Image: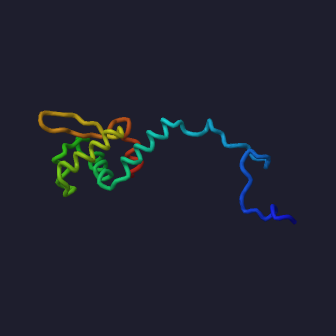
Amino acid sequence: MNQADFSTHPAEPGTGDGRPPPNSEAALSAETAERIADTLRALADPTRLRLLTMLLNAPSGEACVQDLATPLATSQPTVSHHLKILAAAGLVRRDRRGKRSWYSIREERVALVRGLLG
């Protein structure tokens, strides 16, 4: 036996070992991958997950920053910052009424959020 028989490295796909090369058409597009990564980054924070849960379970389906800050024992600017990130990721929408901003989960994202948060 020669030394090549003891190699611990598998043969590269598509190099004659009988396996086809990976199908690049099956990969996510760069744009889709970036969009999903942005959403995952927005979700990767305990405070933002709690905010989404509160919005999901709000009786009217929406809440203002002041209503969200108190139960979280977090300052209003901090809650606003987290909501801005969630809005930028397309998870929540902001509706300005007078001096207050009301937030709700975007209708097209409710199923996603519900599935993630159980």
Say which of 78 and 8 sits in front: 8
Residue sitting at x 27%, y 40%: 104
Question: Is 78 placed above or below 4 here?
Answer: above
Tell whether 75 sits left or right of 118.
left
Residue sitting at x 76%, y 62%: 7
Residue 107 sits in quarter: top left
Q: x, y (%) of residue 3?
A: 81, 64
Q: Where's the N terminus, which quadrant?
A: bottom right
Q: x, y (%) of residue 74?
A: 20, 55
Say which of 91 and 15 sits in front: 15
| Labels in figure, total | 0
Judging from the image, the colouring scheme is rainbow
Tell whether 91 sits left or right of 20.
left
Judged from this view, the residue extending furthest toward the front is 3
Residue sitting at x 46%, y 40%: 34
Say which of 117 and 3 sits in front: 3
Judged from this view, the residue extending furthest toward the right is 1
Say which of 52 and 19 sits in front: 19
Q: x, y (%) of residue 58?
A: 24, 46
Q: x, y (%) of residue 4?
A: 81, 61
Residue sitting at x 38%, y 46%: 114
